[in-house]
Amino acid sequence: MHDAKITVLMPCYNAADYIADAIRSVLGQTFRNFELLIVNDGSNDDTAERVRSFNDDRIILIEQPQLGIAAALNNGLKHARTDYIARFDADDICFADRLEKQYLFMLKNTEYIVVGTGADYIDDCGNFIFTHFPKVVTNAEIQQLAWYRCPFIHASVMFKKIPVMEYGYNTNAHSFEDHLLWLQLKLRGKMYNMPEPLLSVRLNPRSFTMDERKRSRMFHEIKYKALQKKYISKHDGDRLLAMINLQNKSKSKEGAYYSLLAKKFLWNNYDPSRARSNMKKAIMLNSFDIKDYLLYMISYLPENVINNLYAKFVSAK
């Protein structure tokens, strides 16, 4: 589409179960002048066929061997034909007015280079879990945010292509390529988080990124050193990847997925019965994590006690 104003950039890997719904949510936007650039990162399922089933000239499919999300995003940026990029994931759902609201904000506030939003989180089947409202909204709040805290939900952001292209996504920053990029961009222009949810982010065990509290101490040391320096070497990137691959077993990922659901149902959307149901599944899959047993016991405490515990936990982070 030659008059496109926005490129919706969607990397995907083995997303056949969800990508059709994601595409439909983009095609149904109130803002119509966009291109949907989908980078298929070496999927070995029917992802590409699901994309090709849509007859819409705004959809562009790029195929590449499996190189990872950062490489897929960099490849997409090179092919994007517009000045504004809206990130989106292949298992999420865009609210109909997402593009319109972010684009109008950036046109009216030209000094801003990144704009994120809140999000509704849903489970594998599309059931609502909780709404995430950004903890930092204004540029001043984002600029003052501690370097180890990520200000944006990656799939929610719209950004200007040119400043992002100067840095690109670091392919060595496995699992935090976006966080590193925001730190690099902080001095290049203003940033903002729209306080309302404009998409649904799906948590599912297949595309789920391991809860980093379950990562090793060495993983955290490498990551936080990279964030402080705003740089990570290939050597450190390879070490991170080896640690990720060691944990990236279906059983471990599925257990971490249910553990996260349990936390969200307990902390963010008080529903202790659903929290316990998911925690039982997590314990069955990863029976040696003492934190899972502790959370299960906490779920029987009164709601006000649980809320106080969570408030203390958040303030201590």
Image (spheres, helix red, strand yellow):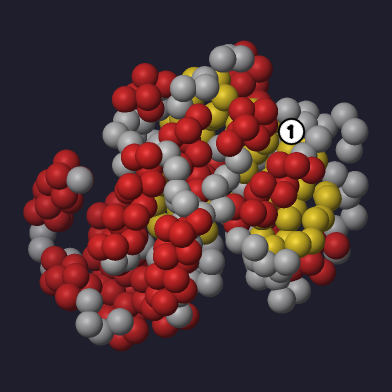
Give above or below for 120 relative to 51.
above
Please give left or right for residue 2 compared with residue 290 in the image: right
Please give left or right for residue 274 compared with residue 188 in the image: left
Q: In which quarter of the image is the N terminus?
A: top right
- The residue lying toward the viewer, choosing from 67 and 237, is 237
- The residue lying toward the viewer, choosing from 56 and 110, is 110
Residue 140 rendering spot, x and y as whole percentages? 37, 19
Tally of numbered discs:
1
- The residue lying toward the viewer, choosing from 304 and 254, is 254
- The residue lying toward the viewer, choosing from 52 and 140, is 140
Crowdedness of circle 1 by 10 Å Cα count: few (<14), some, many (20+)?
A: many
Q: Residue at x 47, y 51 (%)?
A: 233
Three-letter code for the amino acid on which mark 1 is drawn: Ile
Q: Residue at x 72, y 49 (%)?
A: 75
Residue 299 rendering spot, x and y as whole percentages? 17, 66
Please give left or right for residue 73 compared with residue 38 in the image: left
Give above or below for 68 relative to 232.
below
Residue 200 can be seen, yes or no: no
Give above or below for 265 relative to 247.
above
Q: Residue at x 50, y 44 (%)?
A: 178
Residue 157 rendering spot, x and y as whole percentages? 56, 37
Can you identify the residue that label 1 sits on? 6
Give above or below for 112 relative to 97.
above
Label 1's element? strand
Residue 288 can be seen, yes or no: yes
The answer to which quarter of the image holds residue 258 is bottom left
Q: Which residue is drawn at 65% across and 63% down?
A: 67
Q: Quadrant of the C terminus?
A: top left
Residue 173 rendering spot, x and y as whole percentages? 48, 52
